[in-house]
Amino acid sequence: MTGGFDDSGNGNAGMPVVFGGKLYVGTENWSTGGQLWVSQNGTQWTPVFQNGLGHPNNLSANGLLVYRERLYVLFYNDETGLEVWRSSDGQAWLQIGPDGLGDSGNPMVSGFAGSAVFKDRLYLGTGKWDDKLGKVWRLVEKSTYLPLTVRQ
């Protein structure tokens, strides 16, 4: 797909992921909010959402991952902090955890895809542009995140 999915505001398409037999890719859009697109064949794309899931400050939706049969979207948001959303079907979305994971100073997941599954647990690395401090978070029961370590 070229031309920003026919939206000149779209840039920085993230790493595509496969979920439910479909290909998903997120974009960055500083005008309308991050977008998520889906394809069944890799050439024809349709929007899943085009507005940061209703939050125009969710500027980038290019942090995608699949964990335990759910699709996760990690949004960059420099106003209220990153947002983590998940879906079990790729259409209905639920925000898990508070904005910024409880800290509005957490605007992004490191590299927009700073995540890993280790010993069947999901981990996220967060950071800021102007700060050398980072945090590692682990998904725990009830879909909340707890900080594990702080690195300076």
Image (cartoon, rainbow, N blue to C red):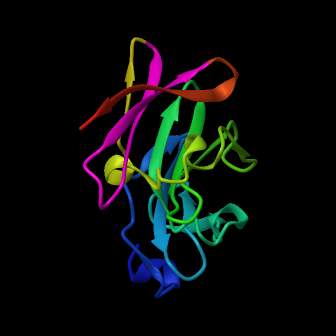
Residue occupying image coordinates x 56% and y 24%: 68
Residue 143 visible in the snapshot: yes
Question: Which residue is at 43% across, 53% downward?
Answer: 108
User: Where is 51 relative to 81, above or below?
Assistant: below
Q: Which residues are magenta?
A: 120-140
Residue placed at 70% from the left, 41% from the top?
A: 89
| Quarter occupied by residue 140 | top right
Residue 20 visible in image: no
| Residue 92 on the magenta segment | no
In the drawing, does residue 97 fall left or right of residue 61? right
Rendering quarter of residue 87: top right
Residue 50: image x %, image y %?
Answer: 63, 71
Location of the N terminus (image quadrant): bottom left
The structure residue drawn at horizontal position 62% and vertical position 65%, both measured from the top left corner, is: 52
Residue 120 on image: x %, y %: 46, 14
Look at the image and say whether residue 133 sits in the magenta stretch: yes
Vertical side of 96 occupied by 116: above or below: above
| Quadrant location, the C terminus | top left
Q: Out of 56 and 50, give the one closest to the viewer.
A: 56
Main SS, magenta residues: strand
